[in-house]
Amino acid sequence: MEALNDAIVALNDTFWLYIIIPVLAVLSLYFTVRSKAVQIRMIPEMVRAMGGKAEIAEDGGKAISSFQAFAISAAARIGTGNIAGVATAIALGGPGAVFWMWTMGLVVGAASFVESTLAQLYKVRDKSGFRGGPAYYMLHGLRARWMGVLFAVVITVTFGFVFTAVQANTIVDAVVTSAEATGMSSNGWMQPVLGVALVALTALIIFGGVRRIAQTAELLVPFMAGLYMLLGLVIVVLNIDALPGVIAQIFSHAFGFEAVAGGGIGAAIVQGVRRGMFSNEAGLGSAPNAGATASVSHPVKQGLVQTLGVYVDTLLVCSTTAFIVLLSNPTFGDEDRGASMTQTALQTNLGDWSLHLMTLIILLVAFTSVLGNYYYGESNVGFLTRSKAMQTGYKWGVLVVVFLGAIGSSDLIWNLADTTMGVMALVNLAAIAPLSAVALKLLRDYNDQRRQGLDPVFTRDRLPELTGVECWEPREPVKAES
């Protein structure tokens, strides 16, 4: 098992450093230039677009709103990547990893805009509203069903199974750490018991469909993110004198001016970008699956909303973890990392009681990530087959993985996640590169309507040259609310 883990680590380092990071960076910079930095100049529009109301779906219930779609993707984003992943990046890459996480977060927002706008354009109707994602824009936009099938399989394995195992493993790790801090000895029994409890809770929600997932995410995501950032703010205030030194560390390590156990500037870049991408998912092709479910009047609206999610994730939640960890004067290296490193840092700053509060936060963020990850897989299983038996089989497969993740090896699970995430990103980036011209046409149409004082509405006849668009029937634009 150790030999397998070492081989996967070696493969990941090469794969990410020489292929994924350069491709993601170059394409994101290209999208930034072509869109005139849409991810920065249209931040006010992102906030405005989130307030749209959903229509009534075919089954008589409300379709997923823009905010609910945002919450589903945020549920998947705001998870172990923010708490365990950022801590691991700092442990292995030093404080400089935080700088590269920030930098890439700003740049890859353009990729997030492109992929989520395309997902909205090429979405399809289902009984509870809409579904879509990269597999759908590969089929309808590129006319490459084989590519859509490949992506659907990879994302189902990556999110539905591997990332779900990561979340379950992190929950158990956090609870065991908290229990042992009280003097309780698990002796191997706690992991399987927690695994069974997670399976039961997950089953209760995923068998209720996408609306139940959206409602759960809409309720929990703002609460858990707000509570976590409040804790981080308290720690910053308590350590305000040390803050300038921590910020200086982040920048000096980022450019190799100071050595670190993780291996200098190369490790900082690789760990910062890799863990940042695991967290914010921009360019990865996962968030568009949630973005496509939203009932909005123009594809660009949800493209903007999903881009805002990158900032909430990277610049707010990930930064919270970074400051919690760095203000505790950690020892860099791979002996202590992951969720337990963040828990220990919080305990160092606020006392023993905070470790247990952190356990609750980890439980909430990781569990909502399980739900978001499950939905990504469900949407893509639906792309592969309409068989209800296969959908039910997928549900049971996820529940098995939840249990296995709870009792499995954290190192092997994390490294497998890195591998499958890289493959998935490469397939998605290969699709959005040629389709970005379509997203830019939609952006121009959106801005033209805004300049006319309209609340933008897209219909197929506005861009008749586009093929493969199944939704977006003609309707009249309306005046924007002042």
Image (cartoon, rainbow, N blue to C red):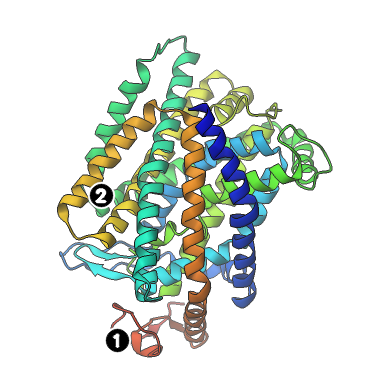
Location of residue 328 by image quarter: top right
Q: Position of residue 58 (x, y in %)?
A: 17, 68
**Residue at x 44%, y 66% (from the top left corner):** 116
Q: Specify whether residue 457 is in view.
A: yes
Location of residue 103 by image quarter: bottom right
Q: Is residue 283 left or right of residue 264?
A: left
* Amino acid residing under circle 2: Arg
Viewer-proximal residue, 335 or 183? 335
What is the distance, in whole Å, between disc 1 and disc 2 at their CAs?
31 Å
- Disc 2 crowd rating (10 Å Cα; few below 14, some 14-19, many 20+) is some
Q: Position of residue 64 (x, y in %)?
A: 30, 61
Q: Is residue 310 left or right of residue 290?
A: right
Work out whether 318 lies above or below 40: above
Q: Is residue 40 left or right of residue 414?
A: right
User: Which residue is the site of mark 1?
Assistant: 474
> Which mark identifies residue 212?
2
Viewer-proximal residue, 334 or 110? 334
**Residue at x 45%, y 32% (from the top left corner):** 170
Q: Is residue 164 left or right of residue 227?
A: left
Q: Position of residue 311 (x, y in %)?
A: 56, 56
Q: Position of residue 250 (x, y in %)?
A: 74, 43
**Residue at x 27%, y 41% (from the top left corner):** 397
Location of residue 320 by image quarter: top right
Q: Secondary structure at mark 2?
A: helix
